[in-house]
């Protein structure tokens, strides 16, 4: 598969994913939106794997299998009442993934523009992870909902 075809497939998948997100707005169409989004993820994964070096597929395939198994177990075990906490946790894991990818790119010493983008990915990913974990903890009742005021910190500026 050429790079141009992969880009075309990515563009179609992004448009389909936007349609899937739109379908998630209504309880009547949410299942269809979820299935469309899952299909987009599978399509993106297959496109990436088609571009990859065949000798290095063991680790990505193992990661996909492990993630799929963890997702299946979570889907079967998490009660509906705990869904907001699960969404917050999954959002945080997406932020962690962004931070890790940015850190790996930074470790490779790319040019200045790549360093700036990678540093932004690390910062945004870290903020997303920490904020989502706090939200999940508050929703679960493990963290207090009230604000914390640090000693010697001005209350108003």
Image (tube, rainbow, N blue to C red):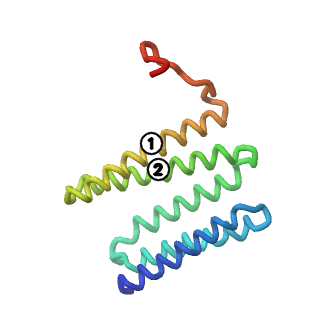
Give the Cα distance between marks 2 and 1: 8 Å
The structure residue drawn at horizontal position 67% and vertical position 70%, both measured from the top left corner, is 35
Position in image of residue 4 (x %, y %): 37, 84
Position in image of residue 62 (x %, y %): 46, 64
Q: In which quadrant is the C terminus drawn?
A: top left
Horizontal side of 132 relative to 33 (left or right) equals left
Q: In which quadrant is the N terminus drawn?
A: bottom left
Which mark is first along the chain, 1 or 2?
2
Packing grade of label 1 (10 A; few <14, some 14-19, many >=20) is: some
Horizontal side of 55 relative to 38 (left or right) equals left
Q: On the image, which quarter does residue 54 sit in?
A: bottom left
Packing grade of label 2 (10 A; few <14, some 14-19, many >=20) is: many
Q: Element under label 2?
A: helix
Q: Is residue 17 above or below residue 8?
A: above
Horizontal side of 125 relative to 146 (left or right) equals left
Q: On the image, which quarter does residue 20 sit in?
A: bottom right
Q: Which residue is mark 1?
A: 127
Q: Nearer the viewer, mark 2 or mark 1?
A: 1
**Disc on res. 95:** 2
The structure residue drawn at horizontal position 67% and vertical position 46%, both measured from the top left corner, is 84
The structure residue drawn at horizontal position 54% and vertical position 39%, both measured from the top left corner, is 133
Q: Element under label 1?
A: helix
The structure residue drawn at horizontal position 70% and vertical position 44%, both measured from the top left corner, is 82
Position in image of residue 6 (x %, y %): 42, 81
Q: Pick the residue in front: 108 or 152.
A: 152
Q: Is residue 147 above or below residue 71?
A: above
Question: Is the C-beta separation of discs 2 and 1 under 8 Å?
Answer: yes
**Disc on res. 31:** none
């Amino acid at each position: 598969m050429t790079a141009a075809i992969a880009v075309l497939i990515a563009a179609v998948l992004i448009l389909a994913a936007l349609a899937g997100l739109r379908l998630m707005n209504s309880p009547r169409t949410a299942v269809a939106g979820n299935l469309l989004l899952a299909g987009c993820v599978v399509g993106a994964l297959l496109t990436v794997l088609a571009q990859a070096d065949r000798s290095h597929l063991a680790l990505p395939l193992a990661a996909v299998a492990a993630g799929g198994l963890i997702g299946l177990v979570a889907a079967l075990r998490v009660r509906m009442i705990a869904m907001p906490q699960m969404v917050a946790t999954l959002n945080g894991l997406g932020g962690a993934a962004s931070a890790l990818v940015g850190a790996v790119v930074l470790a490779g010493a790319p040019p200045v523009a790549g360093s700036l983008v990678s540093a932004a990915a690390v910062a945004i990913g870290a903020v997303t992870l920490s904020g989502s974990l706090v939200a999940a903890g508050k929703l679960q009742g493990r963290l207090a909902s009230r604000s914390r005021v640090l000693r010697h910190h001005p209350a108003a500026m």
